[in-house]
Image (cartoon, rainbow, N blue to C red):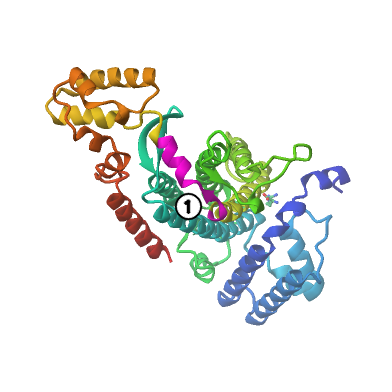
Amino acid sequence: DTSSLVEAFHSSLAFDQRLYPQDIAGSIAHATMLGEQGIIAQGEAAALVNGLTDILTDLRAGTLKLDPTAEDIHTNVEQILVDRLGPVGKKLHTGRSRNDQVALDMRLYLREESKKVQRLIKELLCVLLTLAEKHAATIMPGYTHLQRAQPVTLGHHLLAYVCMLIRDCERLSDAQKRANVCPLGAGALAGTTFDLAPARVAELLTFPAVSLNSIDAVSDRDFVIEFCAAASILMMHLSRLSEEIVLWSSSEYSFIELDDAYSTGSSIMPQKKNPDVAELVRGKTGRVYGSLMAVLTQMKGLPLAYNKDMQEDKEALFDVIDTVKGCLAVYAPMLASMTVKVDRLRQAAEGGYTNATDLADYLAKHGVPFREAHAIVGQAVMHAISLGKNLSEIDLAQYRQWHPAFNADLYKALELETCVNHRVAAGGPALQTTKATIAVVREWMASQA
Ligand code: ARG
């Protein structure tokens, strides 16, 4: 007998029990194929399918409890089947190993969960798009080095995140192409002597492809790693938006105000309204990266084929899925319910000389070499700072002392609307460009339905 210490140590039931729907679906497909191939009698296959269907129903209803001392979900479901059906239950595992079984379960599970994550990303995209549309003309400062740089619009800024999230969604679709391969028939590692029909099992489980190599089928978890990597990139994007939400909701910025339902108070400071959701998402990004590192490290240097190390992929993957879904679910309503302080955004864009580049461009368009124009405007900014004024508050006579190419129309060039709306090139902040981008994104959303 195995030591009870070892039994407790290597049991995965506590966490792999969430795979029971996939495990049973895989077994139903396997049993059906065994019957069709004449490897077991049709009547036996039907009994297995019915028995498995009943187990699924009972587990879903909560009327059947799993055995906490079982080694894993695969062993436990099979044991329940044998308990209920008698000897015919023992035929289910013909031509199969837990090695191809667990690889199948993980691929089935990931396929469903990946779609759920994508659905949540699209819900967040909807909220961001609505905000971008509403604020397509809401001027705000764009930043580099967290210093005010040039005027943009909130719509333009949010569309940057829209673009990131679309790529995140597509990365998940792309990873799915490689994950959506049926490994059943690989057995423990060397296939099987039974006349199985892997393509039929794949068809029953709607896999577009079967594994090309039985050792690869049971040995790799690259599909888990790819998902975790795509999830890590998604979280990296969310963490950046979160950082901005945290900054913007501070009284120093005061660009937005989070709804009371999506912020929290302090147990000691009565005035506090904290952006905990955004902070938690930022923090949970580290947790997702950690899981990616965990699976990469588990797989590193493993000799072919199956090794028990690979059981460790589950908690990491499940945690990534739960974490990402949790973050996305709370993010969309948090953004949808926040208040944007349009006047504060405008006021911030008016300070910080965000239109200085436009004044240099003005000179350059009047024939002054850009480098020279850059230096002249630098001088103008220094002067304005010394007076505590904006560039538009410096009079024309002063400008003409710096360069005769300056004329009264420079004040038009300095208007923030001009600065933004002249940036019409693809991807720029101009209102018409923003609207065109939104239309492209809406088309993408429609193509995803
Ligand atoms: N619980 C195991 C896992 O998750 C299932 C595969 C067991 N296979 C084996 N040869 N011990 O990896």
Instruction: Look at the image and tell me whether residue 245 can be seen.
Output: yes
* Quadrant (top left/top right/bottom left/bottom right) for the C terminus: bottom left
For the stretch drawn in magenta, the main secondary structure is helix
Residue 145, compared with residue 443, is above or below; it is above
Residue 43, compared with residue 310, is above or below; it is below
Disc 1 is placed on an element classified as helix
Image spot of residue 382 (x, y percent): 34, 18
Instruction: Look at the image and tell me whether residue 183 can be seen.
Output: no
Magenta run includes residue 160: no
> Circle 1 sits on which residue?
172
Residue type for callout 1: Leu
Image spot of residue 254 (x, y percent): 54, 39
Residue 347, compared with residue 319, is above or below; it is above
Residue placed furthest toward the bottom: 43
The part of the chain drawn in magenta is 336-349
Image spot of residue 177 (x, y percent): 44, 55
